[in-house]
Image (cartoon, rainbow, N blue to C red):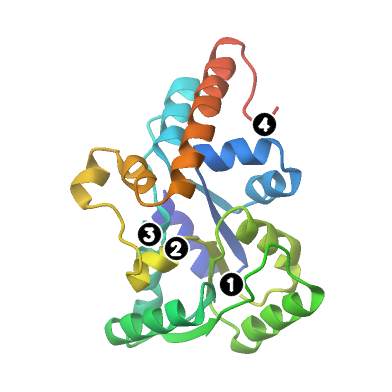
Amino acid sequence: MFNDDINTIFINNEQTIINTINAHSYIVAKSDNVFKNALLESDILLPDGEGIVLMARALMGEKIKKIAGADIHSYLLKEANDKTLKCFYLGASESTLKLIKNKLSKNHTNITFGFYSPPFKDVFSESDNRDMLNKVNEFAPDILFMGMTAPKQEKWVHNHKDQINSKIICSIGAVFDFIAETKKRAPEWVINLKLEWLYRSFTAWRLTKRYIYSTPLFLIEVYKLKYFKKQPND
């Protein structure tokens, strides 16, 4: 299904926003309307978490597969290399972007790459926003990869999508660190056991706190939706 959607995007040549959702972002979105709207108005919203897979099975009887941000990036990068496209990376530090550039340029010789590291702050100024938009639009990428973590990246795209000159906009957050290898993604055997979330929880106290906070709330939400017949968007 994802492959079909992406092929349609390249054929139609229309701007497409790709976001992901997991248990934590679901809980955050319940109290953040801008983030909630950013996710709901995504052109493609992918399940980047076993919690969302569980929710789909429990509420709708659907068997879906987790698609992580790293998987989306790899797929789009292959398409970009096959089609000789332009990719822009917005987010992370200068040093991280340099590592990404050195690594990807060697293995994807058909892609033209662009990079920009925005200021590290909770809220961007109008000047910051103009600088980011100018950098992206001057490059005019076929694919814009956002790496500013959720919900910041999704909200920024949502607020500026009409000003962004890019065919595909894909928010992948921590994947920037995986590409640069400043942080390691879980081994494949851990991913296959559906325990990537547990592996990540041991990599940073910030993520540990996130799982401790979000996981119980999410499971309660699934229970309420299943047994009290509420809808996920209520």
Most foreground residue, 196 or 134: 196
Residue 154 vs 40, above or below: the answer is below
The residues tagged by marks 3 and 4 sit, at their Cα atoms, a distance apart of 27 Å
Which element type, helix, strand or loop, lies under badge 3? helix
Callout 2 secondary element: helix
In this rendering, the label closer to the viewer, 3 or 1: 3
Mark 3 and mark 1 lie on one chain; the one further toward the N terminus is 3
The earlier-in-sequence mark between 3 and 4 is 3
User: Does residue 228 appear to the left or right of 163 in the view shown?
Assistant: left
Name the front one of labels 2 and 4.
4
> Which of the 4 image quarters holds residue 43?
bottom right
**Residue that mark 1 sits on:** 167
Name the residue that disc number 4 marks.
Answer: 233
**Residue corresponding to mark 2:** 7
Nearer the viewer's eye, disc 3 or disc 2?
3
Mark 1 surroundings within 10 Å by alpha-carbon count, few (fewer than 14), some (14 through 19), many (20 or more): some
